Amino acid sequence: MLQIKSKYKIAKRLGAGIFEQTQTQKFALSEARSKATKTPRGRRGGSDYGRQLLEKQRLRFTYGLSERQLSNYAEEAFSQPNPPAALHKALEMRADNAAYRAGIATTRRAARQIVSHGHITVNGKRITIPSYKVHKGDVIAVREGSRTSSLFTRLTDPEEASKGTKSAWIVLDAPLMKAEVVEEPTYTPAESGIDYSTVFEFYSR
């Protein structure tokens, strides 16, 4: 697990959006001060390779993947008619990300932990693998024995539950602590914030 100091260093290089902890006004002000006091010495990542590497790293840290995991996802997606859309769909429909997108967990890191610890079921079956692939029509729920845990009490408070991340492709029923995958996620470059084509350029070298 990355230490928080390391996350700040990584976010300064790859962008604040890759970690929840760096999506704050304090970090933004710190980054602005840092840029203002730096003497220009050339743009890091200005080469094609540097640009591709940075984008690949942004994607990897955003979803909390190992190098091997992302490489495997990219290899599989590259065989599809639309590789960027295929890679985006594969990453979004991981069980941990689905729990995050539904609002069951407030961060991807938290979602990964609750899945790993067996707090989540898919269609009534307990899962412990964050990369478990969900499909349209699947129901993701908090396991019956975990519903009284402090991890999920916010779902019983309408105001708190409304603060969770929501996506159109997965619909949360907060009082029942479950969400249904109503459609497949679609890839829109402007919304995803990731340039998948650049990532594939890296892996095509």
Image: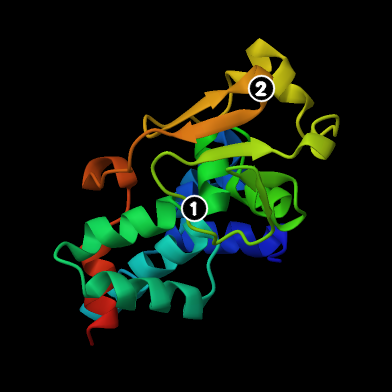
Q: In this figure, which residue is indicated by the disc labeled 1? A: 18
The foreground one among 14 and 154 is 154
Q: In this figure, which residue is indicated by the disc labeled 2? A: 176
Q: Amino acid at mark 2?
A: Leu
On the image, the x and y values in percent for residue 24 come to: 57, 37
Taking the image as shown, residue 89 lies to the left or right of residue 141, namely: left
Does residue 166 appear in this view?
Answer: yes
Could you say which quadrant of the image residue 178 lies in? Answer: top right
The foreground one among 157 and 107 is 157
| Badge 2: residue crowd in 10 Å (few <14, some 14–19, many ≥20) | few
The residue sitting at 54% across, 63% down in the picture is 10
Q: Secondary structure at mark 1?
A: helix
Q: How many marks?
A: 2
> Is 64 situated above or below 137?
below
Taking the image as shown, residue 111 lies to the left or right of residue 33, namely: right
Residues at marks 2 and 1 touching, judged by CB atoms closer than 8 Å: no
> Is 44 situated above or below 114?
below
On the image, the x and y values in percent for residue 133 come to: 48, 57
Could you say which quadrant of the image residue 6 lies in? Answer: bottom right
Which of the two labelled residues, at mark 2 and mark 1, occupies the earlier sequence position?
1
Q: Amino acid at mark 1?
A: Ile
On the image, the x and y values in percent for residue 189 come to: 23, 48
Query: Any mark on residue 179, and which?
Result: none
Q: Which image quarter is the C terminus in?
A: bottom left
The residue sitting at 58% across, 43% down in the picture is 123
Q: Secondary structure at mark 2?
A: helix
On the image, the x and y values in percent for residue 149 come to: 85, 34
